[in-house]
Amino acid sequence: MKKKFISCILVLQILFLGGCGIFSTASSMEREANTQGIRDNYRTFYEVFVYSFYDSDGDGIGDLKGLTSKLDYINDGDDSTDSDLGFSGIWLMPIMPSTTYHKYDVMDYCDIDKEYGTLEDFKAFMEECDNRNISVIIDLVMNHTSSQHPWFLQACEYLRGLDGKEPDGNECKYFQYYHFAKEKLAGYYYPIEGTEWYYEGKFWSEMPDLDLENEEVRQEFTDICQFWLDLGVDGFRLDAAKEYISDRTADNVKILSWFNDMVKSKKEDAYIVAEVWTDMDIYAKYYESGIDSLFNFSFASNDGIIAKTVNGGNDAYTAKAYGKAVEKCKEAFSEYSEVYIDAPFYTNHDMGRSAGYYSGEYSENQTKIAAAMNLFMSGTAFVYYGEELGMKGSGADEKKRAAMLWSLDKNAEGMCKGPEGADTVKMKYDSLEEQAENPGSIYQYYKKAIKIRNSYPEIVKGDTVLVEEISNDQICGLLKSYESGEEGEKAAGAKEVLVVFNISDGEMEVDLSKIMLNGKEIDSKSLKESLLTDETEVSLEEAKLSMPAYSVAILE
């Protein structure tokens, strides 16, 4: 079984490599040098599409054995090394048997798709994750099944044999698992060949929608969750929760409330995060269900707050406005839950990749700082595989899920072919082989940003307040405070860090003389970490913070 707490992950070293963009102004050994205090379900997750990640058997399709062999890349479990990315969680996109490459149409909820391997391979993967204290959540597709799922096949066979009679759930319970109708209702309804019946399929004709208000369907998922929890998974990512009953938020909240209570009754510390792709004022309401997290879509994609802020040129998306938006999250979510954990993310498998959001002279620097703007938000942050390499991909879904760029040589060991058509994606930046040797690469920047995040409970779990006095169109100052007392013990009082972003292409000076931090005036010793995109360093003298273009400073 999973260990309950995250092990100490990281000891940040002072690195000064000319032009590397990862210079740290102070060793985090001055702190606790690990992630003590970052516990429970506050983690940093890596979203993996197994199909495109790493191929162990040479068929061009990624598999669980391949992923297991690359766990040291994600987190090697050894705090003394500096070679892994430092992720403390993995979200696996669907791994269950399916008719499609993406596997969001499930044929069997209690098995592994043969393209990915076997249940024994999954158990081996889980054991290695357990050894590294990596939390694993799996995609659970409850809105619909595959049209080839036995439940649906039996329901359709039953309807074909009615010969004009009315259906009876006592004769075939699976008829009541889906939304069937004798006429084509408004929306996404498809005919059942050889009958007068239609069925609902919101996303595709081959994905018939389930009735999640049906108690027998709920019992099926109760058993399914037990199956995966028994295998050691730490929770679930819930696909398309907004469409359980489309456009009926209150009913979806009730379904999620049932699911949350059911799972938590089996594993109290299970982590549940749901996809509700809509505006914040709507998805915030879903926290009333009691689930841990909802993906924070407002900050994601090329039309989200982060990308619009970094691209600039819009008075509504300044650095200060970004800070106000981050600050607003607590107000929006705490109205519905006192125990919510925000789930900030920047891209995922349904969105164009972030390297394509920026162009021109500063595009690489913009790609980097945008990553920090995501990772330094409070909550459980998510990063899509390949973003740490600046992979590209937009348009068709297949292109957003291209093969992980381990090497520029498509025939190199472990390289996947990716979904059909994905090989036409022209990458903008080098593969891991080159970036691992380049101290100024996007890969090295991500490693540094994740390590800073993991070392500061204030960043991961802290309350966030915009520092109005220093924030403007280019500069955003966020004060993050966290009270770190252990459960049952008296807290020692909140500690504070100040995170300052220069989201511009020029050097900026920030006057911190009027800012108090942990009850003290800021001085030259307050600067602890920095993230850079060029050779110029962040410096702090007499409360004057000098920040090069697209840089981030952490003060304590």
Image (cartoon, rainbow, N blue to C red):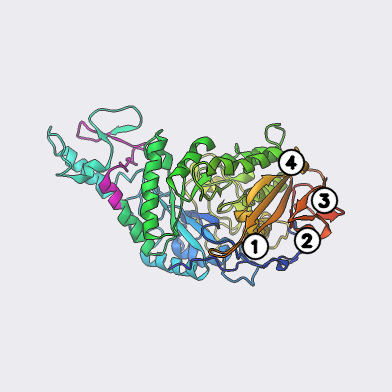
**Label 1 is placed on what type of residue?**
Ala
Label 1 vs label 4: CA separation? Answer: 27 Å
SS class, disc 1:
loop
Are the residues flagged by discs 3 and 2 in contact, CB closer than 8 Å?
no
Q: What residue did someone put label 4 on? A: 468
Residue 514 pos. (x, y %): 81, 47
Q: Earlier in the sequence, mark 4 or mark 3?
A: 4
Are the residues flagged by discs 1 and 3 in contact, CB closer than 8 Å?
no
Q: Earlier in the sequence, mark 3 or mark 2?
A: 2
Are the residues flagged by discs 4 and 3 in contact, CB closer than 8 Å?
no
Which mark lies nearer to you, 2 or 1? 1
What range is drawn magenta here?
A: 191-220
**Label 4 is placed on what type of residue?**
Glu
Q: Residue lying farthest front?
A: 490
Label 4 vs label 2: CA separation? Answer: 25 Å
Which mark lies nearer to you, 4 or 3? 4
Q: What residue did someone put label 3 on? A: 545
**Label 3 is placed on what type of residue?**
Leu
Q: Is the residue marked by circle 1 packed among few (<14), some (14-19), or many (20+) residues within 10 Å? A: few
SS class, disc 4:
helix
Q: What residue did someone put label 2 on? A: 25
Residue 213 pos. (x, y %): 30, 42
Q: What residue did someone put label 1 on? A: 492
Q: Is the residue marked by circle 4 packed among few (<14), some (14-19), or many (20+) residues within 10 Å? A: few
